[in-house]
Amino acid sequence: MLVLASLGCPVEVPDPSPGFGSDTAGTATPTADDSTGHATGPITPVCGDGVAEAYEHCDCGDDPECSAPDLRGHGCTDVEVPDAEGPVTGGTLRCDPTTCRFDTSECTVCGDGHVDDGETCEPEIPLGSTCAELGAGAVGEVVCDPLTCQVDASLCTDCGVVLRIDGCDEGWSTEAANPAAPPSSWACGALRPGIGLGPYSGVWSTNLAGDYADDEASALLSPALELVGCRYDAVEIIVRHSFAFESSGPVITDGGVVQLGDGTSFETIEPHAGTLYDADALQTSWSPPDGQPGFSGRHPDEGQWVESRFRVEGIGRFDPPVLRFVFGSDGSGTDFGWTIDRVEVFEVPPG
């Protein structure tokens, strides 16, 4: 097998048949025959004669639309595309008529920021479609496959719940996270302009009218999560939220954590993607969340609307599963606080 690598395009070309112009099988040099049937010498390929032979990658002659034999049966996905920013998804493989080398300028690449023919999406371009709109499930996530640039709805499911907090009547509740702490400042309603980037309605926030209180340890509890018809015992939790916490220089003080439990006992869960916890522990007046890593006032995402993603294995041990957002402060200063806009929970394959 000959390997042609000119112009960065490795292409395998079959070796001549055994005995073709040589007495040694598999080591022949192509030869031409005269009218008597005798070999007259090696073939010299002619670029442009429409016959791809010897070391030519291709030869389409004067036909701009190359046939499969002209390209030796190759397409864009068979050859190396120089400077490709991602996997090659298709396109049209051409032949340079002056060199008889592959021309990959019309091949398409996943990840180049353009949705080309044969592609249905690009990883960096928002899809704008939901599972429900695609008829793939009530909840879950529609993504763009980074290898094929095809819409992937495999994470869509009917097992899950979306808590949009639009009407403040979805079974949420608040409580003091520590019995010795002051009353909870969590409230539901319209968020005042100036906090985050909007929207300014349908949120739960620590004090809608101003800053949170000193020495607070308060919790916001979701309604019981009704997960019905699930195939897996693992869930993805996506929280859309905004926060602004007081912090004393390099020292982390106020902040919050997300917990999951059965409505009576809870355990802290950590985000695996999106906006993550600060690595250092919060230093609040009460536990929880004192002593735990959490969202803090020195986080670079502070003051923005962000998403945090949590993965929980073994969701079945919580019966029923309830989310709890625990906020804490010390006695040295305050800020806008923590605002929850939307929560989505849906099953995912484990691992």
Image (cartoon, helix red, strand yellow):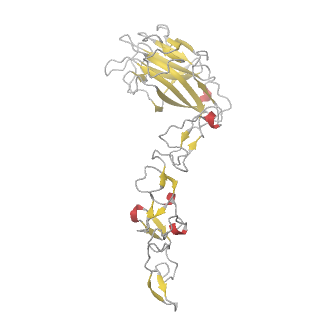
For the residue pair 223 and 68, the one nearer the viewer reads as 68
Which residue extends farthest left? 249
Asked whether, in this view, residue 126 is left or right of residue 156, the answer is left
The quadrant of the picture occupied by the C terminus is: top right
Q: Where is residue 350 in the image (x, y as percent from the top left)?
A: 58, 37
Which residue extends farthest right? 229
Relative to 8, is 23 above or below? below
Q: Is residue 288 visible?
A: no
Q: Where is residue 277 in the image (x, y as percent from the top left)?
A: 43, 27
Q: Can residue 49 be seen in this view?
A: yes
Asked whether, in this view, residue 73 is left or right of residue 292, the answer is right
Relative to 136, is 220 above or below? above
Relative to 329, is 115 above or below? below
Task: Tell me which corner region of the image, top left, top right, bottom left or bottom right, holds residue 344.
Answer: top right
Task: Write the residue at 52% across / 69% down.
Answer: 70
For the residue pair 87 and 250, the one nearer the viewer reads as 87
Q: Where is residue 7 in the image (x, y as percent from the top left)?
A: 39, 63
Task: Write the residue at 64% across / 35% down.
Answer: 137
For the residue pair 295 and 74, the one nearer the viewer reads as 74
Task: Tell me which corner region of the image, top left, top right, bottom left or bottom right, holds residue 264.
Answer: top right
Q: Position of residue 164 (x, y in %)?
A: 57, 22
Asked whether, in this view, residue 316 is left or right of residue 203, the answer is right
Task: Tell me which corner region of the image, top left, top right, bottom left or bottom right, holds residue 237.
Answer: top right
Relative to 113, is 322 above or below? above
